[in-house]
Amino acid sequence: MAALRALLHRRIHAFVPGDFESSDPGNLSAQPIGSVERKEKHATSSRAGNVAALTAINALHEITAHHAVQPYSSGRCFMTTTGIATLDHAPQVFAEWLNELCDDLGFSKPRAYMLLHETLHAIRDFLTVDEAADLAAQLPVLVRGVYFEGWNPSKTPAKPRNKSDLIERVASRFQKEPLDEPDRAVVAVIDLLRRHVSWGEFEQVKHAMRKPVQELWE
């Protein structure tokens, strides 16, 4: 399983070259699935929390379980297509999200990836468990994996969670090259969600936020 997840990580990095801003932010292979399961066992005991946390694990299982793996003569492995469109097109869809952010902000792909990773996590942690799971259901499979990475349902929603808290949380991850306009960068990810999730879900997430934070959705 670890080898399969490492292969998935390399496929993503075919679209996201170079070093990241921080030590391995958003590396889908950073933690074995077993560690995610252990965290889930110690998370909130609510049924909604359990369902949502299992969704995170299943997002990774879907990819690794359905891809056939063939060995090269050298002993290296590669993924073949499965005929399941959602899985085979997942890296392409993920790349399209990054390309849109790059076009909107003029960012490199590693920088756009980090922004997407951190903003999705901030939004997720500002929502209740049920609301976070509802948004996840509308995300493409690889974006969903990034969204759920490292999630601890028992610590959500975060406190405090005002507009400045969300923006500062995202901006604080860019230590090497600070964001010139963190507000604009966060809004770019929100606009990306606006284009890719249903209007009803987008409005639901907006109204789940406190009034000052909702200004970012305007």
Image (spheres, grey):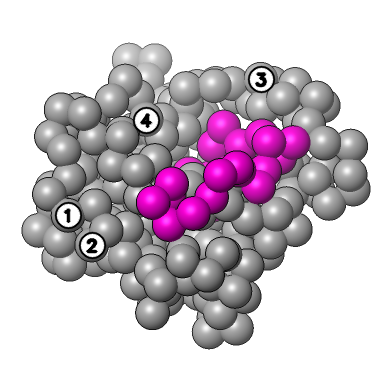
Closest to the camera, between mark 4 and mark 2, is 2
- For residue 181, the mark is 1
Mark nearer the N terminus (1 vs 3): 3
Element type at mark 3: helix
Instruction: Please give the range of residues in magenta.
Output: 143-166
Q: Is residue 27 magenta?
A: no
Residue hosting label 3: 35
Q: With respect to residue 86, does 17 lie above or below? A: above
Asked if marks 4 and 2 touch (Cβ < 8 Å), the reply is: no
**Quarter placement of the N terminus:** top right
Residue 165 x, y percent position in the rendering: 43, 46
* Mark 3 → mark 4, Cα distance in angstroms: 17 Å
Residue 137 x, y percent position in the rendering: 64, 63
Dot 4, crowdedness within 10 Å: few (<14), some or many (≥20)?
Answer: some
Residue hosting label 4: 25
Asked if marks 4 and 1 touch (Cβ < 8 Å), the reply is: no
Residue hosting label 2: 184
Amino acid type assigned to the residue bearing label 4 in the image: Pro
